[in-house]
Image (cartoon, helix red, strand yellow):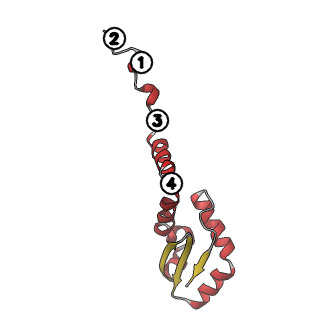
Amino acid sequence: MKSRHNPEFSRQADVVPLKDGIQALLKAYRLQGKMNEVYVVSSWERIMGRAVALKTQEVYFRNGKLFVRLTSAPLKHELFMAKTRVAEIINAEVGEELIKEIVFL
């Protein structure tokens, strides 16, 4: 009979931090991109600031593009002119090049 303290039965070798395990699952099922999309939508106010968020009616992803519906034409124009910078800010926040194109509506 084998001892319970035998390394063969030790689970310590299989122990992985929860964060690493979840990241591995997201990668294996190719869900990380979708999770980052949800994160961007839910964190829009924190990423872009309260002033922009107050004039944002809707934020969503479709076919890999970020769509932002705004209630202010001047803000729409200003963000359109700075959309490369907006994409850089968001991509830096998620740690990957998630946004390749932004459409302001």
- The amino acid type of the residue labelled 4 equals Arg
- Residue lying at 48% horizontally and 56% vertically, measured from the top left: 31
As measured in the structure, the alpha-carbon distance from the residue carrying label 2 to the one carrying label 4 is 41 Å
* Secondary structure at numbered mark 1: helix
As measured in the structure, the alpha-carbon distance from the residue carrying label 1 to the one carrying label 3 is 17 Å
- The amino acid type of the residue labelled 3 equals Val
Please report whichever mark, 1 or 3, sits nearer to the chain's N-terminal start: 1
Q: Which residue is mark 1?
A: 8
Q: Which residue is mark 4?
A: 30
**Where residue 99 appears, x then y in whole percent?**
60, 67
1 and 3 marks in contact (CB < 8 Å): no
Residue 96 sits in quarter: bottom right
Please report whichever mark, 2 or 4, sits nearer to the chain's N-terminal start: 2
Decide: few, some or many residues near mark 1? Use Cα within 10 Å; few <14, some 14-19, many ≥20. few
Q: Which residue is mark 3?
A: 16
**Where residue 90 appears, x then y in whole percent?**
60, 66
Please report whichever mark, 1 or 4, sits nearer to the chain's N-terminal start: 1
**Where residue 6 appears, x then y in whole percent?**
39, 14
- Residue lying at 40% horizontally and 26% vertically, measured from the top left: 11
2 and 1 marks in contact (CB < 8 Å): yes
Indicate the quadrant containing the N terminus: top left, top right, bottom left or bottom right: top left
Instruction: Pick the residue in front: 55 or 83.
Output: 83
Q: Which residue is mark 2?
A: 2
Please report whichever mark, 2 or 3, sits nearer to the chain's N-terminal start: 2
* Secondary structure at numbered mark 4: loop
Q: How many marks?
A: 4
